């Protein structure tokens, strides 16, 4: 077994790929019986410090329908200087540059350790990165101040040649011209009127070759004639200007009467931002960064009216079909998101408010374009400030951890077809021979666009085995998949990263054990969860849960060892043993449960779930719980109410929250001030240990988690109590006769009950 | 003009003064020159004993005193009322004169008229040689029919040594008539011709009523004493007379002038007379410094005291009864209780003892402080705002307008109107520039630099900012100055030629709405708004439409959008002043809709060049910005039972039939109101008018200005005709006609005017004048200028345009006249022509004017002509070199630059005097008149001659004499 774990880990490190199955069932029929589809989690830009990019272009298969890239799996005839494509078996001549090729003089892309390789494309004009700030001014004074400071700070973090632009909005939308001296100039738009891209460009004067308004005066050299110059300027030129402009930003001056929300034209502001970039820099890496402090209250994309007495929609309203503006707003933002994606730009949403801000409606803007979504209580929190700063963090090479306008293409060997992808991507609608008719996630294509991605962005990619049962794959045959990611590197280079992987085929009837052993239950759990979340976005919650349950039961029936109708006989092999538990926690997670979450929160959680890599995703599904006590070194403990003990400090990481929970006794000790007494220094250390560990997580994670420091009986303890498995509740507290743990006041089923049911159903012949 | 007439007689037409070949000819030769002034040999006995005013030679009939001013007799000082005098009987044999008949002009019998043909003959009769040695002429100069003062140094008589310019074309050959060549060097022999011969066949222009004479007489008679308004139904002095007014219970004629101060009691009488009953009201008229502005009365929280039924305001005519506990409304007779706090005892005459302490009980004009009930939304108004909206398209930049304007605004902003003794104006200002898009400016005082906000969404205009757009000048001075410095720079290289217009007004209006205040927009606009936006216009200038049924479309707006916009502006109290700087057609008819309906003004500077037009524009701008304005005003005219205000003319908007809504109203704007009978009036109680204007002062105070005027009522038509005011009548008729062109063909409008005038005069002839020959034209004394003035209206650019008058000019003038007061229409239609070198240089007074006719010009003289809009300096070809030198600093006539607009500043008495005169003329007018120096026989002279309104005009307008004959004929037709 250890070999498979190693293999999986090694593959992940090298290629950024984790498959649900690492040995593939060789026929369509068998594959469908495996319940968990053949799929993988792909992190296209996984950081590879050990992988310097090669400075030449890839060699393509000459068959126009294939165009696969030369890779270590290809058969090479060194004498004839030929190579055979491992996907379409086309024999290709090496290009002239490869004349010196031989067994001992191989290009990097043929070496097995370069199953993932990155090419740098020298062709084509390089255009600078673009950052367009879209800033809400309907904020409280200190919020706005904090935001302004963050924005000003960010200017120093941007690459000096990057273009920046500023749009502010409140009741009106202002597009600021950055090039002027003296008078600061902005174009103002009504916040209630939906404008087409053409109108926006007309009104900004972008359609005419030269709007003579603000041209260089005689005597000065004429500016280069790109028309967007007035709104998007290189940061090194207008740094001071923009800093001042941001400094002078005032709160939206329009009066807000008692009982009203400020009029906030987020929809139009975003529309203008999209239109501006669309007209000026299509297909160039650009970030639209939306900073909003409340829900859009007017115009297209409005989420709630300005009457404070009418609250913003809740899940309850949505279920009752009582959310008046939701559909229209969602449509507006979807339209914008699709346009943005088409142009290769991405939209970040930084929403900081105590109440909801309409993330539900706006989520597609970030989801479809690969933008970030950050949710906080206020811009004046370290959560926002740190997170925002982390956008501009750099990798080991000193490059920004962001890439733009990526296209991911998937090529498969002929036994496989690609069924779809789930992640921050949109379909490019490229039909090809390897596109499956069945769709899982965003399907019907072999290429996807990912407008913004970072080294952790991860897509779930789903495949279908199409090989017919009666046409078995020859013994030892391998299936191959090639992932080709073209993208604009933050250094503005175009790059192509190619990952080619291969796995063994196995006949499921004769070699089920092999397949079973090669099951990656973590990847499978995440991939299934993504499917579930994807469904949940479009379907009713209960249906998704039922679907998930049925899949789990079918998996257990298929791979469990049991005697029919005998639940006690049920066993799962090690490679499956954790899977039901993941499913249990997934069912309770905010990704599928909306209870206790606002629609915005759900959108936020789902957004991150659909793009984080496997480790983070697993933490999201099943939070990690560490225990700190005098009994020994810190140790992970079960995410169970029984772990909550009086003499323990618990540290829970749910990805979105870091909770430090002091057990009852510990809390009393702290209250008594033992930590301040020199003789109890060890207690002080104990208290400090989880804080340090938490800091470590806080420092590393994007977005920065909410940090909660609470204790037994504290109101914030609910964050912990809602996550742990309610093995002890008010119903069974004494029935178990144990003294440890804390009862959870809930009617939710515990893992034990869940497992009992699962076993019963799995062994039942009824389903 | 057509003269309809009878069949031509067999005799060859004798050349008569008006319209030689085709005009009047005496019937059957019985009087070859009968009935024509100037053709009578001296010494002819008057035909009728009723003739009066013969230098005392004839005893005045019917005891009417001779008209003072018309006589050399010392009868001056007598009332100017001419008696109804006997007409001149025709058929008195050759030379049977109609001499000395005031108000009577006889003309040949109708059968003498040839079939109606265009009068194309030369208008210019030779100026008669007035002199005291010619008593015969004097005899004819009864009343104001001609110059009657001894020697006539000022007009008519030739300058010594210089033959009269434009004098008689030649010997009076009957046929064919020779075209008068105005440029011909007059032959000196002509002057030697005996006057009889010269004037034999024509009407002597000196014999027909002379506006100059009338004006001079009124000046002399009534200029010296103040006009006291205590007595009901007094006719005030003419507008051309300088007089002081003492308010003793009726509004000053500066505020209200009526067509008649004695109005018929019944509608039948009114219909018969056809004299329009109208009042020209200028509620916020500026007063000379000697006269006090209206007192402000505060009736406290309960607001001004009003009649409960008709809501008339307390005024001197209200009758207090029951010992002062109640008062009876003078308008509707309703009895109202006097509120306790207002109670006062009555004296023995029934007058309140405090009557003289309270303006509202003793004065004709006063103001009330309005309470919150009189305010929009029951909220006291905020101080108003001025928004300057500047076209920065290519044309505006190129002509230098923007730079000039920005420079000027920097200092002009210190002179915004202030109330009373306020130290600084409460008015806030805002700035917008525009071409195809609008630029708003944030000039908040806390900013280091102004901020520009561009709004491109012209289809759906809105105001992008609230705070910082409208600011107090002194607080934001630095930012404003910085802005005004930068605007010309910012757009210096603009290539944008297209502009929008309606969105600009919309924006200003929305800005005022957002700021919740009234205010005024100053628009500086250059071109036809052809950019894609609401209110987009196309060039529809089509001169082919002139004289067709579609001509009216030239005056109508192209689109209804501007009316809708104007309505919104009025609702917000947003007045729009438009300064136009067109290089070509801009469709003034459409662009002026909003200014017109919002009580604003339009200024037009065609082909604006900074060098040439700077002074005029800046002067107009300064005046326009500085003048006191009332905002968001509503005017209501209440009348005594029996008559009712039915029609209103002026720059305003009306959403119902009674309330005149004025987004803005300044001291130059006039509203003409027409009244009609709806019941009988009472001779005893007379007729009362009360004009109430509710407005917001420039400090933001809500006030009511009340003007009261009592008129007499009559049962005798003669009383009506004795108390008319021709200048006011012309004001009304011009406005009536100018509105008429919107809906009817111009010809119809002109005919209507002529018919109405004929009816008025015919009614007089029929009912008031003593029976006389039909061949005699008899005019009521106070209407004797009606024909000449009406002719001027008829031949004005709007009603009879010349070839050089553009469509825009016509629309512009039409629009201007709509809100002119009586003095302005008077001089506009009959320009003032002042000889400069006739009177001694030392004389401090203005030289007496001469009649606006070419033949009054002497080529050895220099004249100034002004009509309130234009100012010409005409230089005769034979002007003495010394004069040329001292005025123009050049040595000869030929070196004078034609079209010069500034006189050199020279230190000599003549130059000082002329320049002083020009300055004083300009000061009298509400718009700056640009000077144009015209040399005799120069190209520009055509332009100048256009204003010589007594002459035949090039566009076909009749000469005074011709028109008078035509009028006579019309009257005769009506009478027969």
Image (spheres, rainbow, N blue to C red):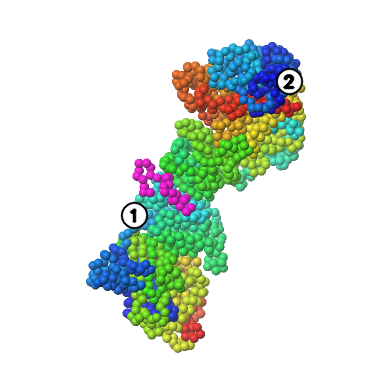
Q: Is residue B106 magenta?
A: no
Q: Position of residue A606 (x, y in %)?
A: 45, 68
Rendered residue at 39%/65% (across/down): A407
Q: Is residue B694 above or below residue A416?
A: above
Number of marks in picture: 2
**Which chain hosts label 2?**
B
The image quarter containing residue B62 is top right
Quickly name the residue at label 2: B87
Q: Main secondary structure of the magenta part?
A: loop
Rendered residue at 45%/87% (across/down): A568
Q: Residue furthest front?
A: B10
Segment colored magenta: A198-225
Side (left or right) of B798 relative to A700:
right
Rendered residue at 48%/41% (across/down): B391
Residue B800 visible in rendering:
yes
Q: Is residue B898 above or below residue B160?
A: below
Q: Is residue A8 above or below residue B562?
A: below
Q: CA distance from mark 1 to mark 2?
A: 102 Å
Q: Nearer the viewer, residue A582 or B65?
A: B65
Rendered residue at 50%/77% (across/down): A546
Q: Look at the numbered disc 2 and give the secondary structure of its residue.
A: loop
The image quarter containing residue A153 is bottom left
Quickly name the residue at label 1: A160
**Which chain hosts label 1?**
A
Q: Look at the numbered disc 1 and give the secondary structure of its residue.
A: loop
Residue A738 visible in rendering:
no
Side (left or right) of B170 relative to A7:
right
């Amino acid at each position: 077994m250890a070999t498979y774990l190693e293999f999986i880990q090694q593959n992940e490190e090298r290629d950024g790929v984790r498959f649900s199955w690492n040995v593939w069932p060789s026929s369509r029929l068998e594959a469908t019986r495996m319940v968990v589809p053949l799929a993988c989690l792909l992190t296209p830009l996984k950081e590879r410090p050990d992988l310097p990019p090669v400075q030449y272009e890839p060699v393509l298969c000459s068959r126009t329908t294939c165009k696969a890239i030369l890779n270590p799996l290809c058969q090479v005839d060194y004498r004839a200087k030929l190579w055979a494509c491992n996907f379409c078996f086309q024999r290709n001549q090496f290009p002239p540059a490869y004349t010196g090729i031989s067994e001992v003089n191989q290009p990097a892309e043929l070496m097995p350790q370069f199953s993932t390789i990155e090419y740098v494309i020298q062709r084509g004009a390089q255009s600078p990165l673009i950052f367009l700030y879209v800033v809400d001014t309907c904020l409280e004074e200190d919020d706005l101040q904090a935001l302004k400071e963050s924005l000003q700070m960010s200017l120093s973090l941007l690459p000096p040649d990057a273009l920046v632009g500023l749009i502010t909005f409140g009741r009106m939308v202002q597009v600021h011209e950055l090039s002027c001296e003296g008078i600061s100039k902005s174009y103002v738009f009504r916040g209630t009127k939906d404008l087409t891209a053409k109108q926006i460009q007309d009104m900004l004067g972008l359609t005419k070759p030269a709007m003579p308004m603000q041209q260089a005066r005689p005597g000065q050299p004429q500016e280069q004639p790109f028309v967007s110059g007035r709104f998007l300027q290189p940061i090194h030129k207008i740094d001071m200007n923009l800093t001042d402009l941001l400094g002078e930003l005032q709160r939206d001056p329009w009066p807000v009467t008692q009982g009203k929300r400020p009029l906030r034209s987020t929809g139009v502001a975003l529309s203008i931002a999209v239109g501006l970039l669309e007209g000026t820099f299509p297909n160039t890496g650009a970030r639209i960064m939306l900073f909003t402090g409340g829900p859009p209250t007017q115009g297209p994309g409005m989420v709630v009216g300005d009457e404070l007495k009418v609250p913003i929609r809740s899940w309850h309203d949505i279920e009752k079909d009582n959310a008046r503006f939701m559909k229209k707003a969602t449509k507006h933002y979807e339209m914008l998101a699709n346009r943005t994606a088409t142009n290769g730009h991405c939209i970040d949403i930084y929403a900081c408010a105590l109440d909801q801000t309409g993330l539900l409606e706006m989520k597609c803007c970030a989801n479809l374009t690969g933008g970030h979504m950050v949710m906080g209580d206020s811009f004046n929190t370290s959560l926002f400030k740190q997170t925002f700063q982390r956008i501009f963090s750099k990798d080991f090479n000193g490059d920004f951890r962001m890439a733009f306008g990526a296209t991911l293409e998937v090529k498969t060997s002929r036994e496989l077809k690609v069924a779809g992808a789930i992640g921050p991507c949109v379909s490019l609608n490229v039909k090809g021979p390897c596109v499956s008719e069945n769709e899982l996630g965003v399907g019907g294509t072999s290429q996807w666009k990912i407008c913004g991605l970072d080294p952790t962005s991860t897509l779930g990619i789903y495949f279908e085995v199409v090989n017919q049962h009666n046409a078995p794959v020859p013994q030892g045959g391998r299936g191959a998949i090639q992932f080709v990611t073209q993208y604009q590197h933050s250094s503005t280079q175009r790059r192509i990263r190619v990952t080619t992987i291969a796995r063994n085929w196995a006949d499921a009837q004769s070699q089920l054990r092999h397949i079973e052993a090669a099951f990656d239950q973590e990847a499978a759990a995440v991939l299934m969860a993504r499917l579930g979340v994807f469904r949940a976005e479009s379907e009713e919650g209960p249906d998704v849960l039922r679907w998930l349950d049925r899949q789990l039961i079918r998996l257990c029936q298929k791979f469990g060892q049991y005697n029919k109708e005998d639940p006690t006989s049920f066993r799962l092999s090690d490679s499956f043993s954790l899977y039901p538990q993941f499913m249990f926690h997934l069912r309770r997670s905010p990704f599928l449960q909306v209870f206790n979450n606002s629609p915005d929160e759900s959108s936020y959680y789902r957004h991150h779930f659909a793009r984080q890599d496997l480790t983070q995703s697993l933490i999201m599904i099943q939070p990690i719980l560490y225990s700190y006590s005098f009994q020994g070194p810190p140790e992970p403990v079960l995410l169970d109410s029984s772990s909550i003990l009086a003499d323990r400090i618990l540290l829970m990481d749910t990805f979105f929250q870091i909770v430090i929970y002091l057990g009852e006794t510990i809390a009393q000790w702290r209250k008594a001030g033992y930590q301040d007494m020199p003789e109890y220094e060890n207690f002080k250390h104990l208290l400090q240990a989880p804080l340090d560990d938490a800091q470590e997580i806080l420092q590393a994670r994007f977005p920065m988690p909410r940090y909660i420091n609470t204790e037994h009986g504290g109101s914030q303890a609910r964050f912990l109590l809602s996550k742990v498995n309610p093995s002890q509740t008010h119903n069974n507290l004494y029935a178990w006769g144990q003294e440890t743990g804390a009862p959870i006041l809930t009617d939710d089923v515990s893992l034990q009950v869940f497992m009992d049911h699962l076993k019963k159903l799995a062994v039942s012949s009824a389903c | 003009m057509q003269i309809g007439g009878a069949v031509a007689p067999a005799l060859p037409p004798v050349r008569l003064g008006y319209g030689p070949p085709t005009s009047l000819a005496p019937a059957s030769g019985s009087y070859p020159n009968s009935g024509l002034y100037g053709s009578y040999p001296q010494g002819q006995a008057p035909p009728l004993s009723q003739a009066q005013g013969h230098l005392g030679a004839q005893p005045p009939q019917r005891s009417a005193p001779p008209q003072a001013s018309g006589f050399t007799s010392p009868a001056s000082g007598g009332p100017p009322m001419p008696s109804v005098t006997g007409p001149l009987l025709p058929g008195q044999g050759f030379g049977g004169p109609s001499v000395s008949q005031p108000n009577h002009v006889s003309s040949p019998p109708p059968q003498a008229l040839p079939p109606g043909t265009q009068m194309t003959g030369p208008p210019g009769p030779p100026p008669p040689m007035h002199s005291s040695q010619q008593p015969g002429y004097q005899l004819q100069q009864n009343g104001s029919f001609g110059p009657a003062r001894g020697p006539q140094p000022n007009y008519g008589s030739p300058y010594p040594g210089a033959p009269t310019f434009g004098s008689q074309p030649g010997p009076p050959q009957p046929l064919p008539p020779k075209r008068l060549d105005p440029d011909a060097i007059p032959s000196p022999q002509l002057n030697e011709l005996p006057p009889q011969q010269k004037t034999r066949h024509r009407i002597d222009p000196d014999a027909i009523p002379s506006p100059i004479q009338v004006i001079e007489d009124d000046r002399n008679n009534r200029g010296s004493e103040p006009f006291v308004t205590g007595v009901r139904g007094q006719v005030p002095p003419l507008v051309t007379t300088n007089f002081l007014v003492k308010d003793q219970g009726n509004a000053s004629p500066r505020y209200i002038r009526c067509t008649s101060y004695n109005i018929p009691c019944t509608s039948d009488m009114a219909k018969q007379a056809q004299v329009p009953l109208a009042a020209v009201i200028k509620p916020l008229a500026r007063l000379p410094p000697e006269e006090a502005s209206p007192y402000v009365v505060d009736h406290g929280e309960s607001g001004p005291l009003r009649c409960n039924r008709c809501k008339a305001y307390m005024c001197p005519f209200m009758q207090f009864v029951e010992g002062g506990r109640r008062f009876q409304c003078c308008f509707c007779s309703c009895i109202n209780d006097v509120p306790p706090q207002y109670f006062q005892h009555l004296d023995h005459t029934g007058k309140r003892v405090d009557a003289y302490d309270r303006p509202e009980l003793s004065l004709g004009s006063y103001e009330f402080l309005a309470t919150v009930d009189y305010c929009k939304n029951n909220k006291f108004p905020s101080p108003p705002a001025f928004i300057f909206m500047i076209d920065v398209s290519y044309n505006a930049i190129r002509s230098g307008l923007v730079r000039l304007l920005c420079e000027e605004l920097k200092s002009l902003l210190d002179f915004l109107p202030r109330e009373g003794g306020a130290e600084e104006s409460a008015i806030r200002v805002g700035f917008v520039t525009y071409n195809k898009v609008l630029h708003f400016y944030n000039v908040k005082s806390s900013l280091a630099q102004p901020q520009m906000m561009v709004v491109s969404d012209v289809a759906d205009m809105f105001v992008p900012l609230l705070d910082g757009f409208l600011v107090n000048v002194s607080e934001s001075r630095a930012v404003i100055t910085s802005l005004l410095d930068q605007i010309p720079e910012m757009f210096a290289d603009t290539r944008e030629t297209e502009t929008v217009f309606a969105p600009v007004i919309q924006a200003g209006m929305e800005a005022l709405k957002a700021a919740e205040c009234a205010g005024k927009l100053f628009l500086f606009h250059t071109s036809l708004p052809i950019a894609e936006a609401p209110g987009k216009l196309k060039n529809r200038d089509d001169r082919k439409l002139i004289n067709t049924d579609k001509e009216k479309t030239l005056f109508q707006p192209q689109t209804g959008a501007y009316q809708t916009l104007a309505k919104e502006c009025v609702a917000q109290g947003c007045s729009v002043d438009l300064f136009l700087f067109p290089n070509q057609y801009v469709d003034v008819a459409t662009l002026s809709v909003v200014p017109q309906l919002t009580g604003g003004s339009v200024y037009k500077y065609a082909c604006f060049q900074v060098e040439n037009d700077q002074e005029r524009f800046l002067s107009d701008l300064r005046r326009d910005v500085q003048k006191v304005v009332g905002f968001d005003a509503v005017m209501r005219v209440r009348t005594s039972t029996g008559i009712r205000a039915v029609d209103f003319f002026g720059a305003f908007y009306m959403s119902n039939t009674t309330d005149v809504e004025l987004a803005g109203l300044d001291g130059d704007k006039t509203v003409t109101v027409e009244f009609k009978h709806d019941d009988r009036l009472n001779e005893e109680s007379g007729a009362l008018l009360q004009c109430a204007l509710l407005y917001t002062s420039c400090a933001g105070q809500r006030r009511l200005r009340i003007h009261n005027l009592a008129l007499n009522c009559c049962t005798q038509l003669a009383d009506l005709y004795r108390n008319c005011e021709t200048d006011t009548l012309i004001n009304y008729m011009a406005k009536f006609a100018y509105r008429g062109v919107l809906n009817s063909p111009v010809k119809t409008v002109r005919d209507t005017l002529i018919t109405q005038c004929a009816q008025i005069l015919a009614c007089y002839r029929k009912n008031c004048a003593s029976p006389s020959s039909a061949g005699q034209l008899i005019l009521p004394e106070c209407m004797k200028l009606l024909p000449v003035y009406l002719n001027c209206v008829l031949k004005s650019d709007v009603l009879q345009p010349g070839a050089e008058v553009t469509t825009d000019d016509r629309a512009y003038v039409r629009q201007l006249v709509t809100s002119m007061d009586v003095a302005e229409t008077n001089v506009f239609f009959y320009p003032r022509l002042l000889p400069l070198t006739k009177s001694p240089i030392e004389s401090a007074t203005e030289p007496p004017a001469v009649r606006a006719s070419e033949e009054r010009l002497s080529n050895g003289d220099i004249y100034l002509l002004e009509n309130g809009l234009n100012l010409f300096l005409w230089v005769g070809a034979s002007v003495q070199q010394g004069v040329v030198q001292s005025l123009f600093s050049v040595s000869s006539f030929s070196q004078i630059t034609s079209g010069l607009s500034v006189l050199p500043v020279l230190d000599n008495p003549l130059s000082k005097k002329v320049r002083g005169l020009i300055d004083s003329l300009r000061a009298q007018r509400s718009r700056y008149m640009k000077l144009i120096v015209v040399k005799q026989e120069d190209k520009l002279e055509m332009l100048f001659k256009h204003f010589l309104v007594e002459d035949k005009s090039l566009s076909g307008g009749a000469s005074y004499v011709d028109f008078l004959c035509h009028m006579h004929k019309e009257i005769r037709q009506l009478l027969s």
